[in-house]
């Protein structure tokens, strides 16, 4: 895995990739360089995930996951430069959304604005109890532009999303769990072990099956139920004539753990 200026990448074993947004001095806020680094990372995984079967996304430090866009950098941007930077962020969001392998957010602290929007694009999320969440854009004279007006209501419902976005007020990890934004709350010293346990369970399963199931869930939710069923069976049928499907059935009958190769 290549090295980057603003993010750290660590391969755990052969199949798990840990990605850390690494600008703790500014709350891991996204500047243009981080936008480009993340875009390159997610695009590379779309192009060829290789042996990687799951990704963990977290932030450096023990206080903030991601504070959103770097407002100190943005203070001096012209409107044209601001829009160009945002286009980079948008492409990165889309690439994360289309990443073929599951991405788990390990939320080590607060996730505000673009930080929360990043969480909402990940496949699911665990967080520490003290984490706070908010979409604060309307308090700055803008609005959510990293997908928040679309992803948040799909998770929490229209009326609650309007309250969150239009007030800009923070909410707690317990509320985020209750509203479906989080899957689990973990004590700080247990966050990464619990995320790693879940990620490893994903890595142990058939990688082609994982990718097809993720694609089916994501795309099916954009369709009516009947078309969703049709999309699902097309995804399913692509797995029937694979070595992994044959290995999975053979291992079940031989009462042993399957050895999936992604073929």
Image (tube, rainbow, N blue to C red):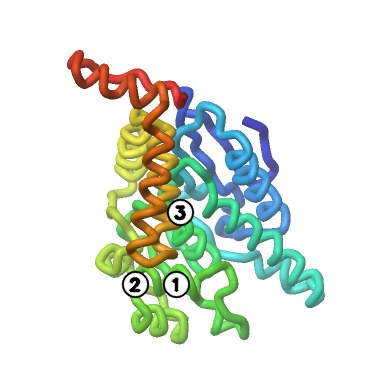
Q: Residues within 10 Å of mark 3 (few under 14, many from 20)?
A: some
Choose top left, top right, bottom left or bottom right for residue 70: bottom right
Query: Of label 3 and label 1, which has the lower sequence position?
Result: 3
Of tags 3 and 1, the one toward the viewer is 3
Is residue 252 depicted above or below 107 in this figure?
Answer: above
**Residue drawn at 80 percent across, 69 percent down:** 81
**Residue drawn at 25 percent across, 67 percent down:** 178
Query: Of label 2 and label 3, which has the lower sequence position?
Result: 3
Q: Position of residue 32 (x, y in %)?
A: 72, 58
Q: Position of residue 26 (x, y in %)?
A: 60, 59
Q: Residues within 10 Å of mark 2 (few under 14, many from 20)?
A: some
The residue that mark 2 highlights is 156
Measure the alpha-carbon separation of dots 2 and 3: 15 Å
The residue that mark 1 highlights is 134
Tag 2, which secondary structure? helix
Which numbered circle lies on residue 48? none
């Amino acid at each position: 895995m290549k090295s980057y200026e603003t993010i750290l990448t660590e391969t755990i074993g052969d199949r798990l990739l840990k990605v850390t947004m690494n600008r703790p001095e500014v709350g891991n806020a996204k500047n243009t360089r981080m936008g480009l680094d993340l875009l390159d990372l997610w695009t590379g995984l779309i192009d060829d995930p290789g042996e990687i079967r799951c990704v963990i996304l977290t932030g450096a430090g023990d206080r903030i996951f991601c504070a959103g866009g770097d407002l100190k950098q943005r203070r001096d941007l012209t409107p044209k430069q601001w829009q160009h930077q945002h286009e980079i962020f948008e492409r990165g969001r889309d690439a994360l959304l289309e990443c073929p392998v599951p991405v788990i957010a390990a939320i080590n602290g607060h996730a505000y604005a673009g930080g929360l929007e990043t969480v909402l694009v990940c496949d699911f999320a665990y967080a520490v109890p003290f984490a706070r969440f908010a979409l604060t854009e309307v308090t700055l004279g803008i609005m959510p532009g990293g997908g928040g007006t679309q992803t948040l209501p799909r998770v929490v419902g229209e009326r609650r999303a309007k309250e969150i976005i239009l007030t800009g007020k923070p909410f707690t990890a317990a509320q985020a769990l209750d509203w479906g934004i989080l899957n689990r709350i973990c004590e700080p010293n247990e966050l990464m072990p619990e995320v790693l346990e879940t990620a490893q369970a994903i890595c142990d399963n058939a990688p082609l099956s994982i990718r097809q199931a993720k694609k089916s869930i994501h795309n099916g939710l954009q369709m009516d139920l009947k078309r969703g069923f049709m999309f699902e069976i097309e995804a399913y049928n692509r797995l029937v004539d694979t070595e992994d499907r044959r290995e999975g059935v053979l291992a079940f009958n031989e009462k042993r753990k399957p050895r999936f190769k992604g073929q």
